[in-house]
Amino acid sequence: MAEEVGDPWEGMNRKIYAFNTKADDLILKPVAKAYVKVLPSPVRSGISNFFSNFAYPMVALNQFLQGKGKKGFADTGRFLVNTTIGIGGLFDPATGMGLVEHDESFSQTFGRWGISSGPYLVVPLWGASTIRGGAGALGDVFAHPMRYVVTSDPLLYGLTGTNLLNKRAELLDLEQFILGDRYIFVRDAYLQREEFLIQDGEVDDPFADDDF
């Protein structure tokens, strides 16, 4: 059964959302558009694959924490295949070998453990979340392999910035589908997607509509 998540801080959340939108319009969005214009699609795909694979040990870790050992070992195998045969994760041969990609995070793990989401929350310079989602995001940050593999601070900051920019560029094409009250649209899409991931697809995927 899907958890009902309230938005008792809507007034504050809307103000933070407006601030985030303004900051994005002024800084991140123009840079993301330039990034897309300069780098061809195959290069951006390779960058996306690299960062996805770099973080993938966290997926396996959360599978194990959720008691899904079989998937945890399969995801470990996926990481090893893409890191070696896939040249550091630039390519994704694991999918062709039947090792399906999964999406697991500490927020989802907390949800599987029965921890309530708490109220909806918009985080400054971050975006849609909940209390549980915020705690999970902190877990993701501290458990990310990049923090332990990359020992040079300038390189760490550069990789982190590139990853964030690449993620923002991937969202550019989706903006045309945001209709009506943008705040409500983003809030509902986030909450539905989070519930879908926690339930491992046993609820309707909000992004499965062919028109979206």
Image (spheres, rainbow, N blue to C red):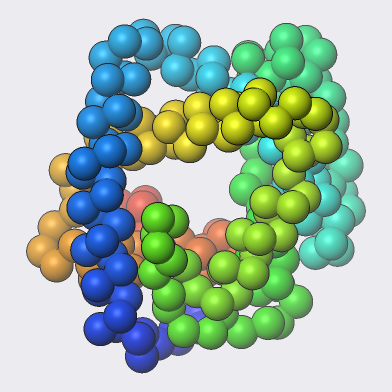
Q: Which residue does the image show at 70% across and 37% down from the upper left?
A: 55
Q: Is residue 206 visible?
A: yes
Quadrant of the image occupied by residue 187: bottom left
Q: Picture coordinates of residue 96 (x, y %)? A: 66, 19
Q: Is residue 47 above or below residue 119?
A: above
Quadrant of the image occupied by residue 145: top right
Q: Which residue does the image show at 57% across and 68% down from the upper left?
A: 134
75 or 128, which is in the foreground? 128
Furthest residue to the bottom?
8
Q: Is residue 127 above or below residue 3?
A: above
Left or right of 101? Residue 165 is left
Q: Picture coordinates of residue 11 (x, y %)? A: 25, 83
The number of callouts visible is 0
Q: Is residue 173 above or below residue 117?
A: above
Q: Picture coordinates of residue 108 (x, y %)? A: 65, 64
Q: Which residue does the image show at 30% across and 57% down from the upper left?
A: 20
Left or right of 183? Residue 199 is right
Q: Is residue 23 above or below residue 55?
A: below
Left or right of 69? Residue 192 is left
Q: Which residue does the image show at 27% across and 46% down from the upper left?
A: 24
Left or right of 203? Residue 139 is right
Quadrant of the image occupied by residue 13: bottom left
Q: Is residue 99 visible?
A: no
160 or 105, which is in the foreground? 160
Furthest residue to the left?
180
Q: Quadrant of the N terminus?
A: bottom right
Q: Picture coordinates of residue 130 (x, y %)? A: 50, 74
